[in-house]
């Protein structure tokens, strides 16, 4: 089969994204995720097949917006978790790189594996990905499992693998008061980030409640009912602990 005919399951498309990588981006949100983050604002991406597109069809649609990206924009694939559709993303990005388009992958690092067969496929994805936007949720493994339903050892493995292979990264951390704002954990996260050689930017993303209506529509109890977004002072405190100014 022609690789460009590989099908992906798409959740939504955003034509003019401004927060998922450099410049103006066309953002593709894929379906499927193994994490069950307590603060997830897109629980509707967890399950279901979504609309099917082949890599060729999707790229033909997306490339029409190329004039709007100027010199520093491009395409970002997000989720859900795009690594669950890695072969599709690799082919989609291959088509983009064939026309010199900047590619970024927004991922939480699950289900990365150091298994040899998996790494062969991941290496092919790395070849056509210019930037990885990696979401680090929490350093403590037990806390991470409680927060997301899965551990974080493989996520840290992925960050180190990207660093060892000289792949550019932006690190993102969602700040939830009383949950992901612990001083010790943030200091530990800074230490881990400092060990990586290719981090260009560190972003603190304030928790928000805009996605709670989706939980209700899906009939799922929202676990953070009553938790308020962080204040500006709380965000700045986290930025200082993560030394985000060092990456600006």
Image (cartoon, helix red, strand yellow):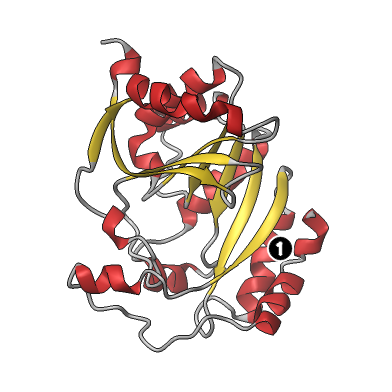
Report x, y in % for residue 99: 56, 16
Q: Residue at x 47, y 67 (%)?
A: 141
In this rendering, the count of numbered labels is 1
Q: Is residue 98 above or below residue 84?
A: above
Q: Is residue 79 above or below residue 41?
A: above
Report x, y in % for residue 216: 23, 74
Indicate the quadrant containing the N terminus: top left, top right, bottom left or bottom right. top left
- Seen as rendered, the residue at the extreme bottom is 226
Residue 129 relative to residue 219: left or right:
right
Q: Residue at x 59, y 33 (%)?
A: 68
Q: Residue at x 30, y 40 (%)?
A: 10
Indicate the quadrant containing the C terminus: top left, top right, bottom left or bottom right. bottom right
Residue 198 occupies which quadrant of the picture?
Answer: top right
Q: Which residue is mark 1?
A: 191
Give the secondary structure at mark 1.
helix
Residue 69 occupies which quadrant of the picture?
Answer: top right
Q: Is residue 224 above or below residue 148?
A: below
Report x, y in % for residue 6: 29, 22
Residue 124 relative to residue 111: left or right:
right
Q: 237 or 183: nearer the eye?
A: 237
């Amino acid at each position: 089969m022609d690789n460009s005919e590989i099908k992906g399951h798409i959740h939504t498309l955003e034509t003019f994204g401004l927060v998922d990588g450099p410049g103006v981006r066309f953002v593709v949100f894929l379906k499927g995720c193994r994490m069950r983050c307590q603060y997830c604002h897109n629980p509707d991406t967890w399950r279901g097949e979504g609309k099917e597109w082949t890599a060729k069809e999707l790229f033909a649609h997306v490339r029409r917006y190329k004039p709007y990206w100027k010199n520093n924009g491009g395409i970002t694939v997000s989720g859900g978790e795009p690594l669950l559709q890695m072969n599709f993303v690799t082919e989609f990005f291959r088509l983009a790189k064939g026309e010199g388009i900047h590619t970024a992958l927004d991922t939480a690092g699950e289900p990365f594996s150091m298994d040899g067969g998996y790494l062969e496929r991941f290496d092919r994805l790395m070849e056509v990905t210019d930037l990885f936007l990696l979401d680090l949720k929490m350093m403590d493994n037990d806390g991470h499992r409680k927060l997301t339903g899965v551990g974080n050892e493989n996520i840290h493995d992925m960050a180190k693998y990207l660093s060892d292979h000289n792949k550019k990264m932006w690190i993102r951390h969602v700040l939830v008061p009383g949950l992901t704002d612990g001083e010790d954990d943030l200091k530990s996260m800074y230490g881990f980030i400092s060990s990586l050689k290719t981090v260009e930017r560190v972003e603190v993303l304030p928790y928000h409640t805009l996605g709670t209506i989706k939980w209700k529509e899906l009939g799922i109890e929202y676990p953070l009912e009553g938790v308020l977004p962080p204040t500006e002072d709380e965000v700045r405190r986290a930025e200082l602990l993560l030394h985000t100014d060092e990456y600006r």
